Amino acid sequence: MEIRKKEVLRYLGFHAASPDEATDALIDAVTKEALACVQPKSIYREVSLRYLDDARTEIGGTVFHSRKLRAHLKQSDRILVFAATLGISADRLVRRYLADDAAKAAVAQAVLAAMIEGYCDEICAQIAKEEGKNGYFLRPRFSPGYADLPLTAQRELFSLLEITKRIGVTLNDACFMLPTKSVTAFIGLTRDKGCAERGCAACDARECAYRSEE
Amino acid sequence: MGFLERLGKEMLLFDGAMGTQLQARGLGAGELPEVWNLTHPDDVADIQSAYVQAGCDILKTNTFGANALKFEGTPYTVEQIVQSAVGIAKRAAAKAPREVLVALDMGPTGKLLKPYGELEFCKAYELYKEQVLAGAQDADLILIETMGDLYEIKAAVLAAKENSDLPVVVTMIFDEQAKLLTGADIETALVTLEALGVDMLGFNCGLGPRQMLPFVQELLRYTSTPVAVNPNAGLPVCVNGVTSYNVTPEAFAEELFKIASCAGVQAVGGCCGTTPAHIGAAARVCKAISPVPVKKKDFTAVTSYGKTVRIGDTPVLIGERINPTGKKRLKEALLAGETSYIFAEAVAQADKGAHILDVNVGLPGIDEPAVLESTVQGLQGITDLPLQIDTSDPAAMERALRIYNGKPLINSVNGKRESMETVFPLAKKYGGAVVCLTLDESGIPASAEGRIRIAERILETAAKYGIEKKDLLFDTLAMTVSTGADNAQITLEALDYIRHTLGVHTVLGVSNISFGLPKRDSINAAFFTLAMERGLSAGIINPKSDAMRNAYYAFCALKGLDPNFEQYIGSVTDAAAPEAAAAPSLKTAVLKGLKEEAGRQARQMLLTEEPLAIINQELIPALDEVGQGFEKGTVFLPQLLMSADAAKAAFEEIKQALARTQDASEPAQKHKIILATVKGDIHDIGKNIVKVLLENYGFSVIDLGKDVDPEVILEKAVREQVRLVGLSALMTTTVANMERTIALFREKYPACKIMVGGAVLTQDYADRIGADFYSKDAMGSVRYAEKCFSE
């Protein structure tokens, strides 16, 4: 699994600066340990897609209220619901480090965040390769909690996929996912290659401490 | 005939899928399949009748997800759903020309249990209990299936056994790497389930029969319990947005036949994607097989949530450090509820090679049952080592055994009648390997023969409780040699006999041998080697002692128990690492974030300097320098924390030294600060980082954890007269709860200052919700705390 060190450093607050030797070694050590313990799993499924108006999209028979999601999907005429997780062992690793090594815990948090993104990218690249044969391109992932799609949309998204049964991710009352290193998303499929705004550039949270400056 | 009478006499056939069959009849995505028991009872009945006609012996009730959590907010009660389901299955079964049994089916709760999720173990138990009470009366057995978490299985099994007399079958879902969702491997799952005393166990769902076969073969290498296997009709594939399973009935039956032919498999059936046609095909080939009994396996093992430790030919190390006897610093930590110290001890022992950790929290004035329970739970959150639950209080023992995730060591029972009558029923019910002390009503026999006689009596009594020899470890009691020159010999003779003649495993609290002698490590290590040579299976020792570790690794190397000397060489290079360059000063060690070096330097300095001088001249200046660097942007978070960890190691040395010198250790009055991650939020790493830093700067932090109710924070703040509270929240959705918490304080405890932090917060946002201070990073909270308490 590819873990982009640049992302890890961004999460750790190194914006443009390069890391010192000790930090660099710590990231490598934690990455090695994390790779050995995570249990990555993913699941996705194509569901029906119908645009109702600028603010409402019917996905898999459920109506989702979000202007940004509608705009984001653009010309997509098909849609996938997607979920991925590093499993409970990722949470366990952070907790074990916290018992006696705060630096490792903070680094693990960053490494695992980069790892789940890397894992999602890897799965999406596989899907893109398959769909490419049919002339389709993948839009970037769009998740509950992004922009004006409320976190509570997780409940509907969860019921569209057997997420808990198939990959063991659960939702708490506040709609957070447990294990925490998990991602759910809608992925539009479009025939239009277009150039997509992705990552931080697509998000309105300009004050976010982790915003990428690219 | 009931299930248990038929078990082993014929190949029992479970029915196939319910969920995918209902979907084929129009069940929508997200719709609860169990509701159909009430809204579409005829559809459910048709499916089950078809399975009966296909030739199944056991129908699973349509109650997989029938728990109160899933039915919250629906017009149905669990009782209604479960009773209707059992009724439908009973009627379908009654139509058969032969006897068809009904299994009350229970699946996962759908929530993750604590500490990684939010569901309390006892709450999971209650959910299952409700299902059992509703359905057990008319069912023939209870099937707990598609389980991915051993802890949740334990809750379900206890609920089944405590609230019904029905046989209990458990089948689990493993992934393609042969792991449960919570990380356990097949051996660990097997050992844990057998300890709980289930009647049958195995696999279902997740995989098709072809992928499952090697897993079944692995399970059969370990199990002494009959095995059930209910695979899917292959792996799920998604075609045009519909999940489907492609293995045909004939191919399914052919593969299932291979599984059913394995010695020890006594029931098969189907899961997702299987249909009456699959079960019919399976019946034609599998019903002809006469099941072969399971071979009883004879190995001793204990487990944690995800790991097995076998006690066999290679001795294992049981870390003795979490026991307050003679340890002032640990006493202090236990009385103050300072779990971080206990957790650090656990991690340190694990790093030094311990295989199992002893946990004893017995102290005068402590609520031992409560503290043991929470300590065991806390330790299981940070270590994957199995634990040895060490208490003489039966109430504490039971509570700890009940919530333990896995199969623990139980320390201990002895030859007294009362002890056996108390401990053996608990060991039988909850499962565990038991440490047996060779003493009785008349004390510790002075001869080896006396101790052996007690061991024999304990063995006999254990058998009456259904506890096998393999689950007992005998302790022949190391008595201090300074009071009797023969003491070591007597212990070793008894140990040798029990291990080699009685054929039972042994354990010793090794360090007891040297009480009252100088340089105890030398005696302990030599005795440890002697004991291992005579047949010691497990030594309760201090893994942080180099002498003990050297003795252990050298012994294993010499006895051919350490292939290629890997462990031995690993242990030697570990210890040889330092001494390379000139040792840095304590201040430099902290600046560079060298944890071990900082501890070592602090220890050195304490020989000649006053603790306060060390703090003021070395630690505080170093922390300040790093802190300022962080604020200026020349030092980054990992470096800041490495320095904090190094300073913490030095502070710990100072605390240890103070605990040794002060009698009734009167801790200096420190300024108290409460930290909490607000209600609804589970992201607590930022809060934990702030805690480490605040403690470094001498503040006493009361950490209330994550997802904390505003009322709980207020109550604690008022009771402890805390003047500063720090709140964290990571998500915009939970900042609302931060606001609520602040509002509550403003109303009820306005004198208390509140600082806030978290990724989504900004100064502007913090102002709007009425916080006194917005901390943009961890150092910010240190500076604000300093300012608050200097006013």
Image (tube, rainbow, N blue to C red):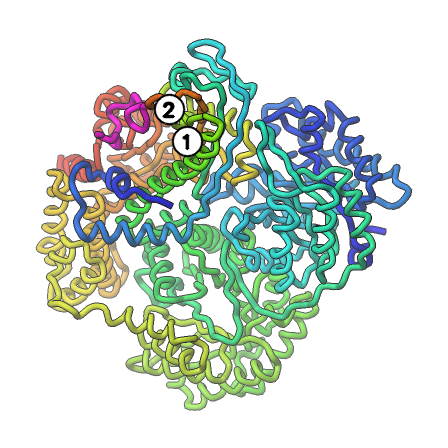
Chain of the residue where label 2 is placed in the rendered structure: A
Q: Are marks 2 and 1 on the same chain?
A: no
- Disc 1 crowd rating (10 Å Cα; few below 14, some 14-19, many 20+) is many
Would residue B545 be found to the left or right of residue B218 on screen? left
Chain of the residue where label 1 is placed in the rendered structure: B
Q: Residue at x 29, y 23 (%)?
A: A205
| Disc 1: which residue | B680
Disc 2 and disc 1: Cα gap in Å? 19 Å
Closer to the camera in the image, B441 or B762: B762
The residue under label 1 is which amino acid type?
Answer: Gly
| Disc 2: which residue | A146
Q: x, y percentage for residue B199?
A: 70, 55
Q: Is residue B527 magenta?
A: no
Q: Secondary structure at mark 2?
A: loop
Closer to the camera in the image, B416 or B766: B766
Closer to the camera in the image, B456 or B219: B219
Q: Is residue A202 magenta?
A: yes
Segment colored magenta = A197-214
- Outermost right residue: B97
Q: Residue at x 89, y 45 (%)?
A: B98
Q: Secondary structure at mark 1?
A: loop
Q: x, y percentage for residue B591?
A: 14, 53
Residue B383 visible within the image: yes
Q: Is residue B406 above or below residue B137?
A: below
